[in-house]
Image: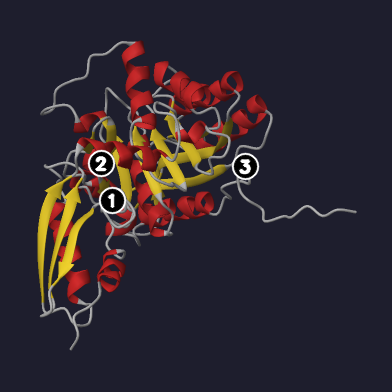
Amino acid sequence: MAAPTRDALFEALSTVEDPEIHRPITDIGMVGDLSCDDSGAVSVTVLLTVSGCPLKSTLERDTRQALAGVEGVTSVDVKLGVMSDEQRAALRQQLRGGQAEREVPFARPDSLTRVYAVASGKGGVGKSSVTSNLAVALAEQGLTVGVVDADIYGFSIPRMLGVDRAPTQVDDMIMPPEAQGVRVISVGMFVPGNQPVVWRGPMLHRALQQFLSDVYWGDLDVLLLDLPPGTGDVAISVAQLIPGTEIIVVTTPQQAAAEVAERAGAIAVQTHQRVVGVIENMSWLELPDGSRQELFGSGGGHRVAESLTRIVGHDVPLLGQIPLDMKLREGADKGAPVVSSAADSPSGVALRGIARSLGSRSRGLSGRKLGLTPTSR
């Protein structure tokens, strides 16, 4: 049997994606030396973006499998090299696609990414649990999803999504780790141990700006931002950095929480943002006999939705009600969101329903090529 051609080998390598950049290694300059002798023994060098790439074993395995499947290949020797400074600079420029560094891609007029800021008036209403589960449920619909843990002081998204590694940094570009099919960035990935973050407003703004501009997100369908509770610095920064951000308000049924949640949504009037809807968490506890016990009262979500409709001047629906569910809490602690680990549980069903309504919303027409050709008369 004749040895395969270099073109055949290169075509096989085009099926291998960098697990962080999500692009074929042939497209981003990661294939170095590639040769095959008359006996069909293949040798290839894969150029890692950085020497400490945490997923180099995945790259090596995928490369070996792709080449081994080519007709005529008898053996595969994969060597791992590292890109030079010049090669990394070219990669960074290619990935940015001509975009200026420090520019937030989601604020560009041609961005098709839907950006949702998940907000709450007070802490403890389950905002982060809602964010992480919505992200996974949206990803399971086939959407490309990213999450920014913008709750700098109370970060918890990495644990809830089961992120088990730090981001890879290519010069000044950060590759977000992926877990549960979701790309994630959080200040918790840069803080050793469980140390507190003690920053004032300008530092918070700078951290958020870096998460949005220095992280290579790729082409996202949806970006979720888990905001800190209240209407402070981060909420204002989000409105400045991504003016097109839409707000999802999370509350519990009790009146005290609902009143505070209204303020979190009402900030949209001042920042000229749209409120997508309200999610009521901890709505009731389902008892063994099928009845419901409303531990935190009832009606809070409806009251917030009705009040925000009056305040912002457009319809703000109640997107859904999530019952109290031990599986939701257990999934968050284990890094196994309930929408995938216990999809048929009461909370899993409710969260997947909310995600379906969000996932069916269009990415918009801004910047999209419509395929229209002008004609002369």
* Residue type at tag 2: Gln
Q: Position of residue 184 (x, y in %)?
A: 30, 41
In the picture of the structure, the residue carrying the numbered disc 3 is 366
* Residue position marked by numbered label 1 in the rendering: 29
Q: Residue furthest front?
A: 38
Residue 308 placement (x, y as % from top left): 60, 29
Asked whether the viewer can see residue 259, the reply is no
Is residue 327 or residue 358 the one in the foreground? 358
For the point 55% across and 54% down, the residue is: 360
Identify the image's colour scheme: rainbow, by chain, secondary structure or one colour: secondary structure
For residue 87, what is the image quadrant?
A: top left
The kind of residue on which mark 3 rests is Ser
In the rendered structure, the answer to whether residue 80 lies left or right of residue 245 reads left
* Residue most extreme to the bottom: 1
Q: Which residue is mark 2?
A: 87
Cα gap from disc 2 to disc 3, whole angstroms: 33 Å
Relative to the observer, which residue lies in front, 16 or 42? Answer: 42
* Alpha carbon separation for disc pair 2 and 1: 8 Å
Classify 263 as above or below 18: above
The N terminus - image quarter: bottom left
Looking at the rendering, in which quadrant would you find the C terminus? Answer: bottom right
* Label 3: element kind: loop
- The residue carrying pointer 1 sits among few (fewer than 14), some (14 to 19) or many (20 or more) residues within 10 Å by Cα, namely some
Q: Earlier in the sequence, mark 2 or mark 1?
A: 1
Q: Earlier in the sequence, mark 2 or mark 3?
A: 2
Against 110, residue 74 (above or below) is below
Q: Nearer the viewer, residue 281 or 206?
A: 206
Q: Is residue 353 left or right of residue 77?
A: right
